[in-house]
């Protein structure tokens, strides 16, 4: 029998995880509709907005390792609290000042804060629902119950995240009709509340990944950078198909991110400034992914080649939908087309990440996924800067969206051709060196909405508890919800926000994807490199 005290502890952990996850998404998604509109109202031109969002991606990518090491030294509970405090300060800055420089500093501070929490909340929940080592027969029974309970935990977590996403998006849109800066202070207060709750609720056994104090920050930072450099060399010298998958996936994130920067400005004009319509677009797009992902996973269980078919079909339909959204001036039709494009990205990512993970040696999974996340950050950041230079007005889609549609379609066809390759298997990938495998730090990039591997129920996302440098579902909430690198899977469908998260906020988790189960993902609260969120 499992003791009553153990059952009570698991229930407390579950409630704490669901509450903090839901509040995390709520805070980030308050800004999904209004953030770019606010930056524009402060006098930022299109080039400056694109550059700022590109900086978010790059900051999150390069900060993942040092903040991960620091989080290991401080512990998950403190790391999550620091993340919320930094985001509270960053978000609130845009409410208290109309300075463009303060606004930019606030956005980047929130992006940095998001890297402190990448996957830490999920890792805590997983470890606290498992039995302590050496618990004997009672521990084995609790372990079996805990394994069954993880599916339930993350399914409930997905519900909490979606509830926070929808409530945050619609609340932020409603507040934005009064004042574009009002959602910023509400998001700041929500993050401050989440910081207090995380300190109060995230109690229990110390995380297994926390090193001894004597290890120190600088030696572990040097060790982690060395592991990533080794992983990069192994990746580039190893499986050429894996390299192509990493590059093609980074291009998908880039071409998804371009419309993600502009959509609120474009559709605000088409719907006459009704921000509630924009909020509904964002909410419907995310919720629509859940049943569609369930259908695609069912299809892939029945047909071995279905993964490639889903990726190719979704990317082709998404590219055509974005072209229609650009060309059609009827607001209702254009909105439907854009939501289809956004949803298509979410349908592509589970299969993409499953294909990538099947080619990675399990001993190097965390390191290689960290390298892939860095590629996402650099490609998307650099691409957004170049796009900003080519776009005259932030609301002009004449150049950017046709380019994004063509790139999205071609990248999808490229990924689809690589996703099912004869002879590929879970053991393919770079050879294992004689040195020890990397010490896991925390799950991290991954976006918009975005995360990559691990087992999930249809539409529900699980965050891998370890993956050094791999991102959870989301990043800093700028643009349509998530801004920044993201490895998020189905949870978020945008290049990610600070936080979450997530739908986080995701890219890749640290757990191995089961061959053939495309659609399984790991994501933190939106989702991973984090994406520039869009509906």
Image (spheres, rainbow, N blue to C red):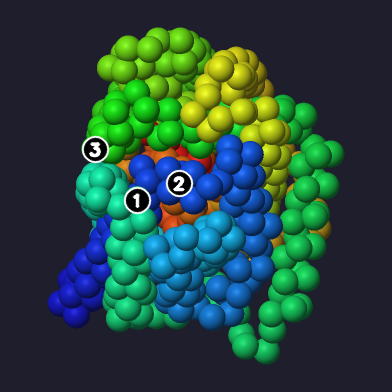
Instruction: Tell me if residue 104 can be seen.
Output: yes
Q: Residue at x 37, y 46 (%)?
A: 34
Q: Nearer the viewer, residue 167 or 289?
A: 167
Q: Position of residue 505 (x, y in %)?
A: 46, 49
Residue for badge 2: 41
Task: Give above or below for 346 relative to 74.
Answer: above
Q: Is residue 425 left or right of residue 195?
A: right
Q: Residue at x 65, y 31 (%)?
A: 387
Q: Earlier in the sequence, mark 3 or mark 1?
A: 1
Q: Position of residue 232 (x, y in %)?
A: 78, 48
Q: Circle 2 sits in a helix, a strand or a loop, which is it?
A: helix
Mark 3 and mark 1: Cα distance apart in space: 13 Å
Label 2 or label 3, whichever lies nearer to me, is 2
Q: Earlier in the sequence, mark 2 or mark 1?
A: 2
At label 1, counting other C-alpha atoms closer than 10 Å, the crowd grade (few under 14, some 14-19, many 20 or more) is many
Residue for badge 1: 180
Q: Position of residue 84 (x, y in %)?
A: 42, 69
Q: Earlier in the sequence, mark 2 or mark 3?
A: 2
Mark 2 and mark 1: Cα distance apart in space: 9 Å
Q: Quadrant where the C terminus lies?
A: top left
Q: Nearer the viewer, residue 385 or 391?
A: 391
Q: Circle 1 sits in a helix, a strand or a loop, which is it?
A: loop
């Amino acid at each position: 029998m499992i003791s009553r005290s153990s059952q009570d502890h698991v229930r407390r952990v579950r409630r704490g995880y669901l509450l903090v996850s839901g509040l995390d998404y709520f805070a980030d998604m308050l800004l999904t509709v209004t953030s770019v509109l606010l930056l524009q109202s402060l006098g930022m031109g299109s080039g400056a907005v694109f550059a700022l969002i590109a900086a978010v991606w790059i900051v999150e990518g390069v900060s993942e390792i040092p903040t991960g090491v620091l989080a290991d030294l401080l512990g998950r509970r403190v790391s999550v609290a620091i993340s919320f405090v930094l985001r509270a300060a960053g978000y609130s800055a845009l409410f208290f000042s109309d300075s463009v420089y303060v606004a930019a500093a606030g956005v980047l501070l929130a992006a940095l804060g998001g890297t402190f929490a990448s996957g830490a909340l999920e890792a805590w929940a997983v470890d606290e629902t498992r039995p302590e080592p050496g618990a004997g027969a009672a521990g084995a029974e609790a372990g079996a119950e805990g394994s069954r309970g993880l599916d339930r935990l993350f399914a409930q977590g997905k519900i909490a995240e979606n509830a926070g996403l929808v409530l945050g998006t619609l609340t932020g849109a409603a507040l934005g009709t009064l004042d574009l800066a009002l959602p910023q202070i509400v998001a700041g207060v929500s993050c401050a509340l989440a910081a207090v709750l995380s300190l109060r609720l995230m109690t229990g056994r110390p995380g297994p990944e926390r090193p001894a104090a004597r290890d120190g920050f600088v030696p572990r930072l040097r060790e982690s950078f060395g592991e990533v450099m080794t992983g990069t060399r192994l990746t580039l010298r190893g499986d050429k198909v894996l390299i192509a998958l990493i590059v093609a996936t980074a291009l998908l994130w880039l071409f998804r991110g371009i419309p993600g920067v502009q959509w609120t400005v474009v559709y605000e004009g088409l719907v006459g400034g009704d921000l509630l319509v924009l909020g509904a677009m964002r909410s419907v797009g995310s919720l629509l992914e859940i049943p569609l992902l369930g259908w695609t996973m069912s299809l892939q269980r029945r047909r071995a080649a279905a993964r490639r078919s889903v990726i190719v079909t979704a990317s082709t339909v998404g590219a055509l939908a974005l072209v229609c959204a650009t060309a059609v001036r009827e607001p209702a039709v254009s909105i439907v087309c854009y939501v289809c494009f956004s949803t298509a990205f979410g349908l592509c990512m589970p299969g993409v990440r499953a294909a990538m993970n099947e080619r990675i040696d399990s001993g190097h999974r965390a390191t290689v996924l960290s390298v892939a996340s860095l590629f996402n950050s650099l490609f998307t950041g650099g691409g957004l800067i170049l796009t900003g230079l080519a776009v005259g007005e932030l609301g002009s889609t004449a150049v950017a969206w046709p380019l994004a549609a063509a790139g999205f379609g071609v990248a999808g066809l490229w990924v689809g051709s690589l996703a099912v390759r004869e002879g590929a298997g879970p053991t393919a990938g770079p050879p294992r060196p004689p040195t020890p495998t990397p010490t896991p730090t925390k799950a991290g990039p991954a976006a918009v909405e975005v995360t990559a591997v691990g087992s999930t129920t249809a539409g529900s996302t699980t965050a891998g508890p370890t993956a050094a440098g791999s991102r959870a579902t989301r990043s800093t909430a700028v643009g349509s919800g998530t801004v920044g690198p993201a490895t998020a899977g189905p949870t978020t469908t945008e290049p990610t926000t600070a936080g979450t998260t997530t739908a986080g906020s995701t890219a890749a988790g640290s757990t191995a994807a089961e061959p053939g189960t495309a659609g399984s993902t790991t994501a933190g609260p939106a989702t991973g490199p984090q994406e520039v969120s869009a509906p």
